Amino acid sequence: MSISRRDFFKKSLVAGAGAAAATMIGPLALEADAKKAAKKIRKAKRVIIMTFDGIRVDGLAQARTPNIDSLIASGSTSYTTRDVMPSITLPNYTSHLTGAGPEVHGVATNGWKVDDFKLQAVERDEDGYFPSVFKVLKDNVPGIKTAYYWNWLPLINGMNPKYIDDKLSAGDEGYPALYDRAMEYIAANRNEKMFMFLYNVHTDHVGHTSAWMSPEYIESIEEGDVQVGRMLDFLKREGLYEDTHILWITDHGGIGKGHGGVSPEEMIVPWIIEGPGIKKGFTIEEANNTVNTASTVLKLFGVEQPLCWTGEVPMSIFE
């Protein structure tokens, strides 16, 4: 009988506490809720990840973000999601999109390339890449369309691009053009299943130049929220919103003018999911990590994740 890492952790905690009846109620209830939710999950039609680089939980709370707030109100949110270490961009986004951490996929620095690394991935495709969510979806969901839009050039280095149908990179401040392209691609493939990744580096760059939690940094989050609003308005106008799952994520926080350490300001970030079958206005209390994002995407599409992945789905998010 197989057992997940989370179940093992729960059972270990119960045993360590003496297996008292009162102590067991929590884990047993969570397990029952997870089994109930697993039966009710509807397969996704369209999953869109929108992400700003370098967002602190308190930065998001301080910024005026009516559109992200609407996702929180109509979805499930973790305010305690952990980065993988190091708390820098490429390892964390690779982890978001591959369901595993650097110790597994090998992307441990922002300078990683498929032909230039120190630690080999535990599993590689024919081109040398650790299997990403793009590859797994392409292999298992017939006809699915995939897209990747980004404006920090090295970000895509951890992904095998041949599994991505539409790609566009823009300059650091050019992310509105990425949203334009994303909306065009969705409209052109409105009847197809789709997975899309849509990224903005602007917030991170402002943190580095003006400091995390500076007025400029807060303003940059608000500027990004405008683009989120454009996407939400588009989906609603086109009649696509009701069958779209949206994740809003980030890679790390920051402190002063930098990041990469293990302070809570760098390591704890927000994570939001909204869409059909997702609890509304729900705060996720269970442990969550960047490696869980790809696992959650596969769960939405009804696809089993590879054995080499370590992520798990926060099952409490499902109605």
Image (tube, rainbow, N blue to C red):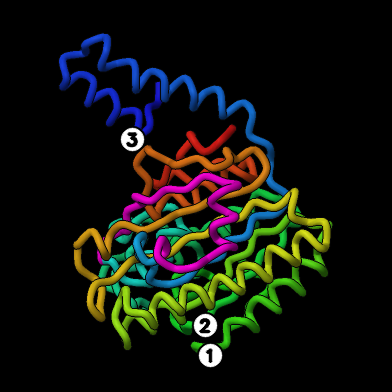
Range of residues picked out in magenta: 60-86
Image side of residue 173 versus residue 31, left or right: right
Seen at 64% across and 29% down, the residue is 40
Q: Nearer the viewer, residue 48 or 132?
A: 48
Q: Residue furthest top?
A: 21
Q: Is residue 313 above or below residue 19?
A: below
Mark 1 secondary-structure assignment: loop
**Amino acid type, callout 2:** Asn
Residue 162 in view in this figure: no
Magenta region includes residue 77: yes
Residue topped by disc 3: 5
Res 85 → quadrant: bottom left
**Do callouts 3 and 1 mark residues in contact (Cβ within 8 Å)?**
no
Cα gap from disc 3 to disc 1, whole angstroms = 40 Å
**Amino acid type, callout 1:** Gly
**Amino acid type, callout 3:** Arg
Query: Number of labelled discs?
Result: 3
Seen at 20% across and 68% down, the residue is 261
Mark nearer the N terminus (3 vs 1) = 3
Q: Nearer the viewer, residue 267 or 92?
A: 267
Q: Nearer the viewer, residue 37 or 154?
A: 37
Residue 215 in view in this figure: yes
Residue 273, percent from left and from top:
54, 50
Residue topped by disc 1: 171
Image side of residue 202 versus residue 7, left or right: right
Magenta region includes residue 316: no
Seen at 54% across and 42% down, the residue is 281
